[in-house]
Image: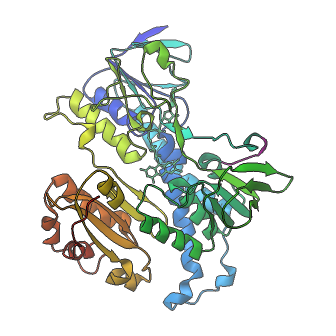
């Protein structure tokens, strides 16, 4: 059976549902196709479950150090009930997923299909034995954990960021292959739940996209909680016996083997574009499978757009949602037109202390040829951090010495995931750093130190 719509949206992740609702609200007929769970990665296996579990882990951590704050608890008996922790997570995830699902099903002019969508041509998509056609098709298929080809991996029951979220038993010793954003959040979370944790990273430092002093400080924070970190792990190789899994890591320092009870593979993500029939529509991808798009998220085929993680232009919920905003604004009469290149990259790493990031790091700014000035301050000199007893970290702002515009910032410290937004906003307003320097912030907050840091810039440097 053939059904014709004004628009088809493939994937109900972080861009698709809002776009479908926008079409429906404009009186257009729209089909949205989802093959698995409404809300996609973020709601079901990404942001929501991880941040919910991190909140539980933080309570365990706080309970153990209550004494430092003058509160006496029987810390020896602080116990983590993983079933209860998982049940709490499930409640929060389910509420979010169900809310979205009910909303989508309730939209007038919107038809929901549950099934795997595949292009049949540039204007048609098959799902569940039916063929749907539309003049406009939007791809929002997201990604999944990338599985590397390490020797031995085929014989080992490894975990991914998805399957680890379902564990109801606590790993005795969790090995984590990959010392980047996803791996580090899990490392601290499981350490706080009570597992031994070893992070295995092939680079010479964690978080190779961040400035070295930020990565060093995060490593120190994790090690202080008892997490083992193995860097320069060349030629990773996995094997197992009945009770354990071993990683041969060939690190320059330390034992060449690490043995644990479970292993998590956290080495990046791959787009869900291989089983979409893109070749039938003539849509181009790059070598890694990301769909190529222009500055307004259009693919090379007229009438087809790609939004969210599958276009490789962002790897976050806020970037996927911003893709929706760009496409919707341009399709529904936005003036001026919105573009991808106007987006300022920003994100957070939700370890403790969190890292809030925007724009360029110092090293990226120098590599791009900017003459820069740096303002920085350790968190030990931030009153609110001292009051909270959480003085690990630093804040660092990178200024373009010629224009006085802020190029980027890293805030690593308590409250950093919120404090970074004052810098994001000033960058978006495209005003000189002096505007922020002269703004009064509330005392005592972490944010109040940002104007102070901007008043203490170092000399101009360039490459
Ligand atoms: C462990 C983890 C933690 C994360 N934490 C954060 C965080 O704290 N903050 C943040 O901003 N981001 C975080 N992310 C990233 C965030 O989850 C993603 O960037 C975001 O979900 C991308 O949204 P999307 O709409 O592009 O794709 P997705 O959310 O992945 O949605 C794509 C949807 O398309 C469906 N689909 C795929 N192929 C087809 C098909 N052929 N037919 C029909 N349907 C299909 C999928 O089932 C899925 O529902 C995290 C990710 C992970 C893995």
Q: Quadrant of residue 78?
A: bottom right
- 255 on left or right of 53: right
Q: Quadrant of the C terminus?
A: bottom left
Residue at the extreme front of the image, as rendered? 463
- 160 on left or right of 343: right
From the viewer's side, name the closer residue of 411 and 389: 411
Residue 122 on the magenta span:
no
Q: Is residue 78 visible?
A: yes
- 275 on left or right of 84: left
Q: Residue at x 42, y 59 (%)?
A: 210
Residue at the extreme right of the image, as rendered? 242
What percent of the width, then of the height, locates residue 354?
A: 43, 66
- 386 on left or right of 264: left
Q: Quadrant of residue 202?
A: bottom right
What percent of the width, then of the height, locates residue 174?
A: 69, 60
Give the magenta part as a residue range. 155-159
Q: Quadrant of residue 324?
A: top left
What percent of the width, then of the height, locates residue 152?
A: 76, 43
From the viewer's side, name the closer residue of 419 and 240: 240
Q: Does residue 17 lie above or below 283 as drawn?
A: below
Q: Is residue 170 visible?
A: no
Residue at the extreme bottom of the image, as rendered? 70
What percent of the width, then of the height, locates residue 344?
A: 28, 49
The colour scheme applied to this rendered structure is: rainbow
Q: How many numbered marks does the figure carry?
A: 0
From the viewer's side, name the closer residue of 90 and 463: 463
Q: Does residue 283 lie above or below 194 as drawn?
A: above
Main secondary structure type of the part rendered in magenta: loop
Residue 158 on the magenta span:
yes
């Amino acid at each position: 059976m053939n059904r014709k719509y004004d628009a088809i949206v493939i994937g109900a992740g972080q861009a698709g549902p809002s776009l479908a609702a926008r079409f429906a609200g404009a009186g257009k007929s729209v089909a949205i196709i989802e093959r698995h769970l409404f809300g996609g990665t973020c709601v079901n296996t990404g942001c929501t479950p991880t941040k919910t579990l991190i909140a539980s882990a933080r309570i365990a951590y706080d309970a153990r150090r209550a004494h430092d704050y003058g509160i006496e608890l029987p810390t020896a008996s602080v116990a983590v009930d993983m079933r209860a922790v998982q049940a709490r997570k499930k409640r929060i995830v389910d509420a979010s997923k169900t809310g979205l699902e009910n909303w989508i099903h309730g939209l007038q002019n919107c038809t929901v299909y549950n099934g795997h969508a595949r292009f049949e041509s540039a204007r048609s998509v098959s799902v569940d034995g039916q063929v749907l056609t539309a003049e406009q098709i939007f791809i929002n298929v997201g990604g999944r954990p990338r599985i590397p080809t390490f020797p031995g991996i085929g014989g080992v029951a490894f975990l991914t960021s998805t399957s680890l979220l379902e564990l109801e038993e606590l790993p005795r010793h969790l090995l984590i292959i990959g010392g980047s954003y996803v791996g580090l959040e899990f490392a601290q979370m499981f350490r706080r739940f009570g597992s031994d944790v070893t992070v295995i990273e092939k680079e010479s430092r964690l978080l190779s996209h961040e400035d070295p002093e930020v990565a060093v400080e995060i490593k120190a924070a994790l090690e202080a909680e008892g997490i083992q970190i193995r860097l320069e792990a060349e030629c990773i190789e996995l094997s197992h016996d009945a009770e354990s899994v071993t990683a041969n890591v060939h690190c320059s320092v330390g034992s060449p083997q690490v043995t644990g009870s479970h292993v998590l593979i956290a080495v990046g993500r791959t787009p869900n574009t291989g089983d979409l029939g893109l070749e039938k529509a003539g849509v181009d991808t790059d070598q890694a499978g990301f769909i190529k798009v222009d500055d307004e998220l259009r693919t090379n085929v007229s009438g087809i757009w790609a939004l969210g993680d599958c276009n490789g232009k962002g790897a976050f919920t806020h970037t996927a949602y911003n893709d929706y905003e760009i496409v919707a604004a341009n399709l529904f009469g936005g003036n001026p037109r919105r573009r991808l290149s106007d987006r300022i990259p920003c994100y957070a790493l939700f370890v403790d202390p969190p890292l809030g990031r925007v724009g360029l790091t110092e090293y990226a700014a120098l590599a791009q040829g900017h003459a820069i000035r740096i303002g920085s301050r350790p968190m030990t000199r931030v009153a609110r951090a001292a009051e909270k007893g959480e003085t690990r970290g630093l804040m660092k702002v990178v200024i373009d010495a010629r224009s006085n515009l802020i190029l980027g910032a890293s805030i690593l410290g308590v409250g950093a995931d919120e404090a970074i937004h004052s810098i994001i906003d000033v960058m978006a307003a495209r005003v000189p750093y002096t505007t922020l320097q002269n703004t009064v912030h509330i005392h005592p907050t972490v944010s109040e130190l940002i104007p102070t840091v901007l008043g203490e810039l170092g000399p101009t440097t360039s490459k």
